[in-house]
Image (cartoon, coloured by chain):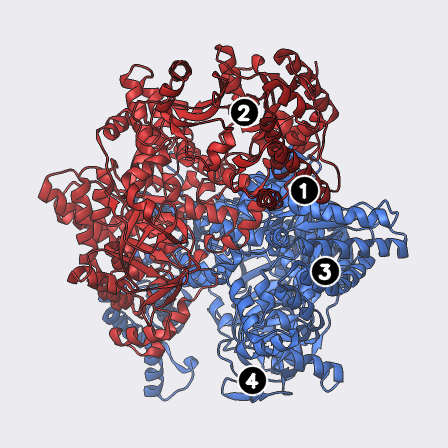
Chain colours: A blue, B red
């Protein structure tokens, strides 16, 4: 038998989602369980894939099969395409595996032509309705299928109304509608160079092609990339006989949810319009009534709908989102699907369904999208206050949450304003941020930058802090001297109130009240279920005691990455750091390091105190030293003065540190190889801090020291020898039996390739997949923005490899390193740090690859816990 | 039985080189075949390794074994350590697997003390000789073993001579020598804080330790790195009873070769000194006599020596380098080894030995070090003229050969001077060169730069051109304005003559005659033998018809890499390139590309004409576009004018092209993805050129198009689709059936990791191991110089991964990609381009990995042919 590309609704079921799309599978399922569904057929997703393989053509076999199913459908519904007496009219809708806004809109009333419109008029006894449907169809077909501009049609309607002296469509009668059809078809011929297709089958084939084509439109591509939907899934097409909600006052159409998608409350939630088709509800010209009102208007229909809704929820065991049409008091179901919901609703529904005995805990854990949790952890704008607010600009949604505060333009001003109490809440507005701004960023409610993307300094640091950030709003013009910025034609001065939404990128020119994050009882119950299934440990990245506490509050079981250099940027510390860098002898360098030591040790003590016996993994100095030096001439002059050296000498140091490709330069453990005294100082700080906290708390602190950027085992051994010599002496001097571990980052391809050797010296591996991605792809994250857009456009990459771990390339290295590492050291601890550690699909990969832990920023910890639980449920490890 | 660490000479043989070192194995071998060898023992290389494992200690077991062998030796030679009547005196020499200058000097006369010196005096009847030997021993031991400064001893000698009123050592008598010994020992005690060791066994153990220690001295480490000798080989120690060449006029010592090591001529070549020890020959105070003179002085000894030399050469079947001592007309052999020789001699000896029936061709092919061939292919200084020349400075030996010419300071001046005939031969002196200097570099005899290393632009381009280059001579101070430079206190102006030696890095302040490269009959006979064994194809890298011809002359079987961007830098072309870059629309870009097209096509025609039916692999545009734009403000102004755009606009373009890590930026195929019209133009140039040359020559030209920097198969497919669409149309329009191939560089780790997928679209892979090394190690070649010195110092890396392919990491990726590629496409053509393609050890790896070809710069082609032949002989493929 030839491959089957078309299925009647009676031939499918809800398990056939991949083949029939979500909509098609559910129409079939509803048909199967005896719901009133207007009948029709689904053209499969495979037909779509075939269409692209055939060079955007529907091949003869598929064409023949569609014609065959038109005949079958005509027989089932007892109507015929183009029939003057009893015409078959259909809707055509796209429907892919995953719900995908951005694809083709619906085409209604397909099958109308100059003959069948008369049949419709006779059948309904309503010529105005028939011709209104006809002109709508011509308009919709021209727009959606033929991609003609809408404005031509709107001009014609306006002209007709003006001629007649009326203002509303409703004032046009049957003849006016007829007139419109003639004019519309003339416009069509003028623009398209051919007559409007009168053959319903031709109309249908054109519509099917349009659905297939819409799979590849830019909106759809963008949506897919954002939601990790593979391009090769394709979309199905649903052809369904029309039910007319617009055939009079005993007809109507509506949308309803079995529970409140905003709160999760268990009550029917929805709205409907009398005498309308689906598009009218969307268009928003008329205000729909709440679904409860249907109880009064058509009680039997309402009862039937409530019954169906209950049956559907029980059948699917999840909150349903349904579309229905009433034609002359007869109810038709046009769609059902698991409804989209807010994070709060998702949690409540999952927990309620367990309490109602509908689902078990395992199923509940699978029901919440991990990414959704994010919004529960941050302040949000008060919805009422938000409605009234005007959006004055939009940037990138760089770090979620809502912030409201007074504008300041420098990190120092932010600090001073908050410390002095002159402002309580500030929003820091910068062209871009730099490491020196870190303290100002910490006191700000939110950060707004003109330049920089999702991975700019501002974005990365803000996400780490859990602070709201909108980045890269290029429309803002900042004048630092005047302390003001202009946006959308208005000027905002220091002290003016603004609000920003890091979840949408919206910027508001006024104060908007925020509501605090609420992590209620449902949240902790739900997360406890998740933890029950989880097999990966979840650690947090934390550079200071505050972050450590935050991560711990969110359930982190350890610290996977403490970036010690972040401790160096604070104003009081960076001076010693700079003294170290400009030192020309080892002795001078050691003297400067001695000044840094107490700061580091203090921070580590704070972190050990917070984490107790949970692992704390401290990465040694990583960035190239030039990052600590100024770049602007004025700063260079000032800092040379502070350091007590000549400007020329400072220039000399800066020049000597200049690198062509700093990403691949003198950084990571290469610094410790050149200047072992840095590793000595850092070891001293870690070990002394751990000894002190052990003494103070009696807890068995076991610090983990992590050497970054290793590419060769001898390099690791060299630095490790320095660490061990220093640590063992301190521990012996303290008469302690404290243990500590030394491990490494695997972030250079060569480290992954030689992981068997490296494991001889490393007690743990932490995959630094940010750098590993850069090196494996051979592109720098800072520069890739310039060309990656072309790559997305041309579907070379479907998703951002810095957001989702590239499993084919980078993942292969991770797997290889994990296997090689375990060959040498079966009990080696393996984890991932960096942004992928908080990304659900990457976490699933880590679970499947058998890693021991993931580490992510504090606010991602709950997401990682849930994603890890879901991965374990999908594919449990022995 | 315990591990054996010491072997008598009678216990070893020449096959035990790894254990006994070269010297030890050959002393044993000579003993075995009945040569007169002063007996002794060898402490193995394993003892050296053990010494380092034990923390630089000779452990008790080894110590005991040494004492045991001292006793055995005493019995064999019938003398005793420290004996007053018949004292055993020994020499102690290092000897590793490979001959390694840079390790410990020899210690002679060990075993002398206040007692045994009397024994020696009595035995020889020559107290002056005995005390002279003693004072020499104290001096040598203090210097070599205890690392005391020589100057103290020299001062004492000078004082004694002054006191006595004589000038020559020879004028000092036995008492003076005795006096020297007393004073030397006093100095020793003063400096070392203890008495000079009088126990010969203690002396011996100290000397053995010194030999072991010398394996790790900086000179030795540098030598090993340059010669790829692994650190873990260790050195053996040879303890041999002394023969006294300094015991009177019937004694002497000398060195001889069985053939002339300079020319290869078959005649005994060497020199000797009467009444001397080895060190006197080296010291050069007395002028040795040619070996032929020994025939007159001691005919029987001479005859015996000739006989031994002949037997040794026949035994080893190679030219021997021998040391001998005559003690009272008795000949002793102290060493024999395969002699070092010049490239010319190596060739002649290999060919002669075949003609003499001593060795077969296969053995001959193994006898010449591939790297040596290099010097045969370049001009050399006339040796006589060179002797008189004064070295005024030294830079890096960046590109071999000798050059002599008049100084010019800019590429334009070089071109103008040569074109106008105002100077015939120029040496271009620059701070550093840049791509725009390329034409000036091409006309220069040699290039001398102040900055830049072995991989600087000047070095890389010069090697490609086969032009002599000395780079990075930091002592030079250039004044471009005055057109002069100063070096070693002297100023050289434009037009002054200098000479530079790219094989040594020497700079001479005058003209020195050069002799042209001579590739005689021996060369081609020898290379034909090599080609007979070779299984790898050898291609050349060539960016223009001239290089193609050069490579072809040296035996290249195709072009493995034509870097098309090098064609863009010439003055007349770069303007169109810049127009392309500043274009703001696709149309403007296409117009500019249309100007470049004829240049490219012309170059390709030239290359196809030279290469005929041999493959020509053309890589599409690779470098980031900013490389084509000026950086200096004055140039920006000028070029904006030329391009007819504002300076501000040009700045805008330059800013927009700025990258943080250009190595990992917008380059390679990423350019073609963004601007497919570039790939279209280049395809047009390649295909049209090939069609034209087919038509003109009737030859079956099959161009290979190579897409650089691919990391993902879809990326390759995207660019390939552009290439194929363009090419197929041109070929069809020309009514031709021409074939062409499209392949890719594998130079990004991800390409290697996903090579199975990439092979679906690529007909060949060319491993770009320069970039692959950078990405795999995660360090940029331009920046690594800053920290790699620490890595060498600490023996983390033993050799430069850019010079020798890193087999563990990068090599693993190459192997993986080769296997994955062949899985998908069994007949895929695999090769390597880039500098490793001309490096013998890397070529051996390519052979062993089963690649099909290597490609290297024209002057490396003969080296690669020989290296490939040697690899095939060592490890033939089925």
Residue under mark 1: which chain is it in? A
Circle 1 Cα neighbour tier, 10 Å, few/some/many (<14 / 14–19 / ≥20): many
Q: Nearer the viewer, residue A869 or B228?
A: B228
- For the residues bearing labels 2 and 1, Cβ distance under 8 angstroms: no
Foreground disc of the pair 4, 3: 4
Q: Nearer the viewer, residue B693 or A458?
A: B693
Foreground disc of the pair 3, 2: 2
Residue A360 appears in the picture as rendered: no
Foreground disc of the pair 4, 1: 1
Q: Position of residue B338 (x, y in %)?
A: 42, 24
Foreground disc of the pair 4, 2: 2
Circle 2 Cα neighbour tier, 10 Å, few/some/many (<14 / 14–19 / ≥20): many
Circle 4 Cα neighbour tier, 10 Å, few/some/many (<14 / 14–19 / ≥20): some
Q: Which residue is mark 4?
A: A480
Q: Which residue is mark 2?
A: B21
Dots 4 and 3 on the same chain: yes
Q: CA distance from mark 4 to mark 1?
A: 49 Å
Q: CA distance from mark 4 to mark 3?
A: 47 Å
Q: Which residue is mark 1?
A: A762
The disc, 4 or 1, on the residue closer to the chain's N-terminal end is: 4
Q: Secondary structure at mark 2?
A: helix
């Amino acid at each position: 038998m030839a491959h089957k590309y078309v299925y009647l609704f009676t031939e499918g079921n809800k398990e056939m989602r991949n083949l029939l799309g979500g909509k098609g599978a559910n129409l079939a399922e509803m048909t199967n369980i005896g719901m009133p569904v207007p009948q029709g057929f689904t053209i499969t997703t495979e037909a779509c894939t075939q269409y692209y393989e055939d060079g955007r053509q529907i091949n003869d076999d598929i064409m023949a099969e569609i014609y065959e199913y038109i005949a079958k459908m005509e027989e089932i519904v007892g109507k015929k395409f183009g029939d003057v007496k009893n015409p078959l009219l259909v809707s055509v809708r796209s429907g892919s595996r995953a719900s995908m806004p951005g694809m083709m809109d619906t085409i209604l009333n397909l099958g109308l032509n100059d003959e069948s419109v008369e049949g419709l008029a006779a059948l309904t006894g309503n010529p105005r309705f028939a011709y209104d449907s006809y002109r709508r169809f011509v308009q919709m077909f021209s727009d959606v299928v033929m991609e003609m501009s809408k404005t031509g049609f709107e001009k014609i309607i306006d002209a007709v109304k003006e001629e007649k002296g009326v203002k509303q469509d409703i004032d046009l009668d049957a003849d006016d509608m007829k007139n419109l059809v003639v004019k519309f078809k003339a416009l069509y011929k003028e623009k398209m160079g051919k007559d409007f297709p009168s053959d319903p089958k031709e109309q249908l084939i054109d519509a099917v092609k349009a659905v297939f084509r819409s799979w590849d439109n830019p909106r759809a591509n963008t949506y897919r990339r954002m939601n990790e939907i593979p391009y090769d899934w394709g979309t199905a097409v649903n052809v369904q006989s029309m039910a007319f909600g617009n055939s009079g006052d005993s007809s109507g159409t509506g949308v309803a949810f079995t529970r409140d998608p905003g709160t999760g409350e268990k009550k029917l939630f929805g709205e409907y319009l009398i005498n309308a088709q689906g598009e009218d509800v969307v268009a928003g010209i008329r205000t729909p009534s709440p679904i409860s009102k249907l109880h009064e208007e058509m009680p039997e229909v309402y009862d039937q709908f409530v019954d169906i809704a209950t049956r559907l929820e029980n059948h699917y065991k999840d909150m349903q989102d349904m579309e229905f049409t009433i034609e002359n008091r007869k109810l038709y179901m046009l769609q059902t699907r698991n409804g989209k919901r807010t994070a709060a609703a998702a949690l409540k529904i999952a927990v309620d369904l367990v309490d109602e005995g509908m689902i078990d805990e395992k199923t509940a854990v699978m029901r919440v999208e991990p990414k959704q949790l994010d919004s529960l952890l941050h302040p949000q704008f008060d919805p009422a206050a938000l409605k009234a607010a005007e959006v004055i600009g939009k940037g990138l949604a760089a770090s979620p949450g809502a912030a409201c505060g007074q504008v300041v333009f420098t990190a120092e001003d932010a600090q001073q304003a908050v410390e002095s109490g002159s402002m309580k809440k500030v929003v820091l507005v910068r062209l871009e941020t730099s490491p020196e701004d870190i303290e100002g960023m910490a006191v700000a409610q939110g950060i707004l930058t003109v330049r920089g993307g999702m991975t700019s300094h501002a974005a990365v640091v803000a996400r780490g802090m859990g602070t709201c950030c909108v980045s890269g709003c290029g429309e803002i013009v900042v004048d630092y001297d005047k302390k003001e910025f202009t946006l959308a034609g208005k000027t905002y001065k220091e002290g003016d109130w603004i609000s920003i939404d890091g979840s949408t990128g919206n910027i508001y020119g006024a104060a908007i009240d925020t509501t605090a994050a609420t992590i209620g009882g449902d949240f902790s119950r739900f997360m406890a279920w998740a933890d029950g299934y989880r097999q990966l440990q979840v650690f947090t990245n934390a550079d200071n005691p505050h972050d450590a506490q935050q991560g711990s509050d969110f359930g982190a079981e350890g610290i996977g990455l403490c970036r010690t250099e972040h401790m160096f940027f604070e104003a009081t510390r960076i001076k010693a750091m700079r003294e170290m860098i400009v030192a020309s002898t080892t002795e001078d360098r050691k003297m400067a390091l001695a000044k840094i030591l107490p700061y580091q040790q203090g921070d580590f003590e704070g972190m050990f105190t917070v984490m107790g016996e949970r692992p704390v993994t401290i990465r040694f100095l990583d960035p190239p030293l030039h990052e600590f030096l100024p770049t602007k001439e004025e700063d260079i002059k000032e800092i040379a003065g502070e350091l007590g050296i000549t400007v020329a000498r400072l220039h000399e140091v800066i020049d000597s540190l200049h690198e062509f490709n700093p990403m691949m330069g003198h950084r990571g453990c290469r610094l410790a190889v050149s200047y072992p005294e840095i590793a000595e100082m850092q070891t001293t700080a870690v070990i002394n801090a751990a000894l002190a906290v052990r003494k103070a708390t009696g807890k068995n602190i076991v610090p983990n020291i992590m050497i970054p950027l290793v590419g060769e085992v001898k390099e690791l051994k060299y630095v490790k020898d320095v660490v061990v010599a220093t640590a063992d002496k301190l521990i012996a001097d303290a008469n302690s039996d404290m243990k500590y571990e030394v491990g490494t980052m695997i972030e250079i391809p060569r480290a992954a390739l030689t992981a068997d050797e490296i494991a001889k010296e490393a007690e743990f591996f932490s995959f630094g997949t940010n750098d590993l991605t850069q090196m494996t792809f051979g592109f720098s994250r800072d520069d890739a923005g310039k060309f990656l857009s072309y790559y997305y456009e041309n579907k070379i990459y479907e998703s951002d490899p810095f957001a989702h771990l590239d499993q084919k390339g980078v993942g292969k290295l991770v797997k290889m390193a994990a296997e090689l590492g375990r060959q040498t050291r079966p009990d080696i601890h393996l984890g991932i740090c960096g942004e992928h550690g908080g990304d659900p699909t990457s976490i699933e990969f880590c679970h499947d690859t058998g890693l021991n832990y993931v580490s992510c920023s504090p606010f991602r910890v709950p997401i990682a816990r849930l994603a890890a639980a879901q991965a374990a449920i999908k594919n449990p490890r022995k």
